[in-house]
Image (cartoon, rainbow, N blue to C red):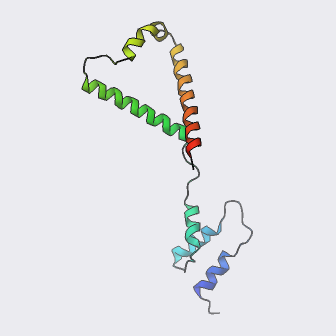
Amino acid sequence: ANRSPQSTLTRDIVPRPMLKGQTSVVVVSRLARIGEWMSSDSADSVGEFIQGESEPSSSWVFLAMGIVLSLATLILHGMLFPGHDLPVISDILPVFEGVFDSGIWFFILGIMMGVFAIIATMMTEATSE
């Protein structure tokens, strides 16, 4: 009737039919909290157990970084050159005076954001791994 902690642990890790979502990692974690001996291969299993479901979409990361960078540039220009118009943009804006008066501008912004998100996704997929 004398069983060592190693034989008990080995017996509990033996693969057996499990319900969906159950893993042997849960058994190892439970035994580790009780103070039982933990096998060396369970360290890899714990890494899989605490890993997240998914990562944020890379296009959203690029979009957020672009917005933050744009706002930072506008703030920096306002601090360095107070009272001056933005270079290039202030020359182009009078051409689009009729566009700003209508609601079509929101559709144009949506299309631009969609195109930039697609380009950002293509760039990250091409450079990943």
Residue 29 versus residue 45: which sits nearer the camera?
45
Q: Is residue 65 above or below residue 7?
A: above
Classify 50 as above or below 55.
below
Q: Residue at x 69, y 76 (%)?
A: 14
Q: In the rendering, at what x and y percent does residue 49 appear? A: 58, 62
Residue furthest to the right in view is 17
Q: Could you say which is closer to the camera, residue 43 or residue 26? A: 43
Occupied quadrant, residue 1: bottom right
Q: Quadrant of residue 7?
A: bottom right
Q: Does residue 55 appear left or right of residue 80 in this picture?
A: right
What is the total number of numbered labels drawn onto the structure image? 0
Above or below — where is 33 with respect to 67?
A: below
Relative horizontal placement of residue 89, taking residue 29 as reference (left or right)? left
| 92 vs 63, nearest the viewer | 92
Spot occupied by residue 51 in the image (x, y as percentages of width and height): 55, 58
Residue under the point 40% across and 34% down? 68
Residue at 41%, 12% (x, y): give it: 93
In percent of width and height, residue 13 lies at 66, 75
Residue, far top: 98
Q: Residue at the spot x=37%, y=14% of the render?
A: 90
Given the current orientation, which residue lies at the most extreme bottom position? Answer: 1
- Residue 61 relative to residue 88: left or right: right
Say above or below: 101 vs 67. above
